[in-house]
Structures are given as structure tokens and as C-alpha cells.
Image (cartoon, helix red, strand yellow):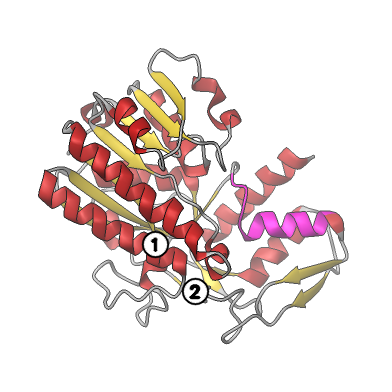
Amino acid sequence: MLSTSDLGRVFITGGAGFIGSYTVDALCRNKNEVVVFDNLSSGRLENIKQWLNAPNFLFKQSDLLKPEKIQKHLSDCETVFHLAANPEVRLGSTDPKVHYEQNIATTFNLLEAIRKNGNVKNFVFTSSSTVYGDAEKIPTPENYAPLEPVSVYGASKLASEALIISFAYTYGFNAALCRLANIIGPRTQHGVICDFINKLRKNPKKLEILGDGTQTKSYLDVEDCVNAMLTGISQPIRVEAYNIGSEDKINVKKIADIVCREMGLKNVEYVYTGGVDGGRGWKGDVKIMLLDIEKIKALGWKPRLNSHQAVEKTTKALLQQKE
């Protein structure tokens, strides 16, 4: 098993973003040399400010849609964490080109730079539970088939996985495909918890809930997620997919209850939009998601927090930030 010291110099796309910045924290604390490549479209320098003057850290504001920039800053890096993407799943139903450009084209540009560079030995990709679509088997294992994503976002992640697999086998680097549940934590800027807090700040008596409130999914604390990714890349295997999530799930109504309680609100009227296709929040929303995480657990990792605890922790942290 590899340790983080075996990863060499690490190149992180989207390193100023939510999951990316926690990955930076973990690696910089372990004294790895880290290069962050981020266009700051959704990432924030505030997330990585503690490392900006560190001797083992380098930040480059640039875009993966500019291939010539990638090659220049990738030199001497042995490990790549590809975390940059457009995270808004809903956007695909109205503007699918965004997911093609920000998720698929950027992945190809990065892989081409890696091919030309020749130094990269390890590659970690943040894929998504959305590649499974409406899985008939719950919890869903990594070998579930057929993979039929119901959102453009999920399709873009699956297409990226295929590109990564082909490049890994053809050009000889190891790849860990991390299929993530809903990852939440103090630096998150989108998702259901942020949505509820923002709505209740405007109107503490009424809360609009997309769908019918029964959408039920797995939520995982971001620090647990980063530890799982580091566990996955520690295995010297050419290509492996790992589900990363909690062992339980929570529905949207219960999340609303937690947010209201933490905000000290009582008797809030919940107004359900009814949603589409049987109570989904939006077109392409997966209504029930729980991943089988036995493969990553067999490597010694397990989540510290369950879905309920992760939602509580994130809600408390976001409310403190907004006060």
C-alpha cells in the first residue's frame, strides 16, 4: 500500500473548490508538494489561503479548456487529482453544453497533457453516483450494470470515466475512479442544505421543497470523502472504481427538519413543488441513491459520520458562516 509520501508531486484540478480544498489540506499537512490548477469559476482562494505562502504549495489560476497551460504546470508531477467540474446537476436539463465542456472536454485536455508529460503514475477522478442512474439494486455495487445515467451530468461523468480508463491502459498510469455520494461540509456552496438555508433566511415561515420530499440519498462528510480517495489511490492497481458514501440515507424532508431546527424555527410550512417523474426534484434527479461501499471498506476505510450526522455538522457550520 502506498502512503501519501509515495505520491510525489501532486497536481490538483479544482483545488480551490469544495472537495479540492480539503484534499489540499490533507496533502499539504502531510508535506506533499502540491500544485493547484483552478480557474476560480466556483473555487475560492479563501478555501486555500492557509497554504498560499507555504513552500510546498503552488497555485496557478488557469483553465483546463486551455491545453497549453496544463502541460506547462503539470511537469514533474507524479499524481493527479482531477476534481474540477461543473457540480450543478440540475444545469444539464437546461444547458447540456456546460457539462460537455466543463466535464468531458476538460478531462480529455488533461489526459492529453498527461500523455505528453509522461511522468504521471497515479490519477484520481471524482466521478459520481449519478453514473448508475435509477439503479434497481440498492445499495448499488461498483459492478452494477447497465450504467444508464438519467442526467447529462451523470453522462458526462461516465464519459470521463471511459476516457480515463482508456488512457490509463494505453499510457500506463494507475487510476482510481471515485463514485461519490452527496458530499457535504462547511465549505460547500450548493446543494439542498444551502438552498434551504437561503430560502429560510428570506422567509422563515415557509419553505419551498423541490419534488415531493421523499427523495432519499446518501450524504457523506467531505473529510471522510478525502480520506476515502487517499485510501483508493493507495492501491497499486491499473484501474479501479470505488463507491464512496455513507452506509445510510436520509430524505429531503428530514433534511428540512434538521435545517429548521438548527435555525431555531418552528411551524415552518413546507410547500412541495411535486417535482417531475414521480416526485423528483428536477428532470434527471435520481430519487433514491445508496452506494454499496464494501470495496473501499475492505481497504481499511469507513465513514466517521453517517448521513444524519453529516447533515447536522454541515448545517451548523454553514449557519455560523452566515451569521
Q: Is residue 120 visible?
A: no
The residue that mark 2 highlights is: 286
CA–CA distance in space, label 2 to label 1: 15 Å
Which region is colored magenta? 188-201
Q: Indicate the position of residue 52 as horizontal and vertical percent values.
A: 50, 19
Left or right relative to 42: residue 153: left
Residue 156 is labelled as 1
Tell me if residue 215 comes above or below residue 40 in the rendering: below
Q: Say which residue appears at 49% left-offset and 74% top-offset.
A: 286
**Camera-side residue: 321 or 278?**
278
Q: Alpha-carbon neighbours of circle 1 within 10 Å: few (<14), some, or many (≥20)? A: many
- Looking at the image, which residue is at 46% across and 32% down? 62
Vertical order, 170 against 230 (above or below)? below
Within 10 angstroms of label 2, few (less than 14), some, or many (20 or more) residues?
many
Residue depicted at 78% across the width and 73% down the height: 270
| Circle 2: element type | loop
Most extreme residue toward the bottom, as rendered?
278
Eye-nearest disc, 2 or 1: 1
- At label 1, the amino acid type is Ser
Describe residue 234's horizontal placement relative to residue 50 as left or right. Answer: left
Q: Is residue 24 visible?
A: yes
Give the overall secondary structure of the magenta segment: helix
- Residue 201's tag is none
* Residue 203 spot, x, y in % from top left: 87, 61
- Mark 2 or 1, nearer chain start: 1
Residue 193 part of the magenta segment:
yes
